[in-house]
Image (cartoon, grey):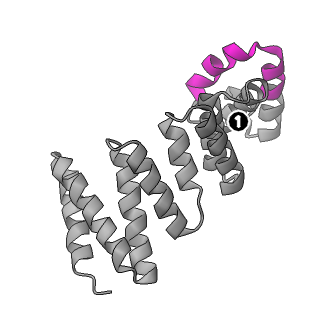
Amino acid sequence: MEQYQRGGDLGVLLDALRLLATRTPTNELPALAEPYRDHPEVVIPLYERIVEERPDDARALVVLANAYWLTGRGPDVVGELAARAVAAEPSNRGAWHLWALTESNVRARVARWQQVSERFPADQLARAALADNAASLAGAEHDPRALDLAVATYEGLLAETRDPAPRAALEAALTTLRGWKL
C-alpha cells in the first residue's frame, strides 16, 4: 500500500493483492483488509477472493458490494451482491440498505426503503432515506401521497431526535415540505 501511495500504480497494487489473496487462508483475509477498510482498491481484491470461497457469507458480500459501490461499479453488480446477502442473512441491515440504495427508479426505491424501514423500525438511517426519497418523488412527480409519506416519516424522526443540529435540519425540511403545493 505504501508503494501504491507513493507511485500510484493501481495495476501493481491489484496484482499484488490478488496474489496475496490466493496465498492467504480465506479466514485471515478480513483481518488483513481491516486496516484498509476505507480503501476500496485494497478491499475489493481481498473480498472478491472471500466471496469466491464463501458465496453465502452475507458480511463479505456486503463489504464487497459497498466497495464496488464506492468505486462506481454500478447498481446492477452491487444490487445482485446485496440481494445475495439478504437471502443469506435476512437480518443483515447493511445488505438491505445496499439493496434499497441500488434501485434506480425513485418510486421503486421508495418502496424498497419502506420495506427496510418496516423490517428495522428503529433504523433511523433507513427512515431518513425513505423520507428523502419520498420527498424527491413528491417533487419530481407532484405526488401528494409521497409528500404525506415524507412528512410523516420526518415527523417520526423529529419526535425521536434530541440533538439540536439534526432537529433543526428536520424542522427545516418539514417547514419546506409543508409549504409545498402539489
Kindly give the residue lying farthest to the bottom in the view shown: 181
- Number of labelled discs? 1
Residue 27's quadrant in the figure? top right
- In-front residue for pair 158/56: 56
Residue 152 % position (x, y): 26, 63
Residue 73, above or below 61: below
Q: Is residue 166 left or right of residue 137?
A: left
Residue 73 % position (x, y): 70, 52
Say if the magenta span includes residue 30: yes
| Residue at image location 53% in from the left, 53% down from the top | 100
Q: Which residues are magenta?
A: 17-36
Dividing the image into 4 quarters, which one contains the N terminus? top right
Residue 57 % position (x, y): 65, 27
- In-front residue for pair 42/104: 104
Say if the magenta span includes residue 126: no
Residue 118 % position (x, y): 39, 48
The residue identified by callout 1 is 44
| Residue at image location 73% in from the left, 30% down from the top | 55
Q: Is residue 69 left or right of residue 23?
A: left
| Residue at image location 66% in from the left, 37% down from the top | 64
Residue 62's quadrant in the figure? top right
Q: Main secondary structure of the magenta part?
A: helix
Residue 140, above or below 11: below
| Residue at image location 33% in from the left, 86% down from the top | 182
Kind of residue at badge 1: Ile
Residue 153, above or below 118: below
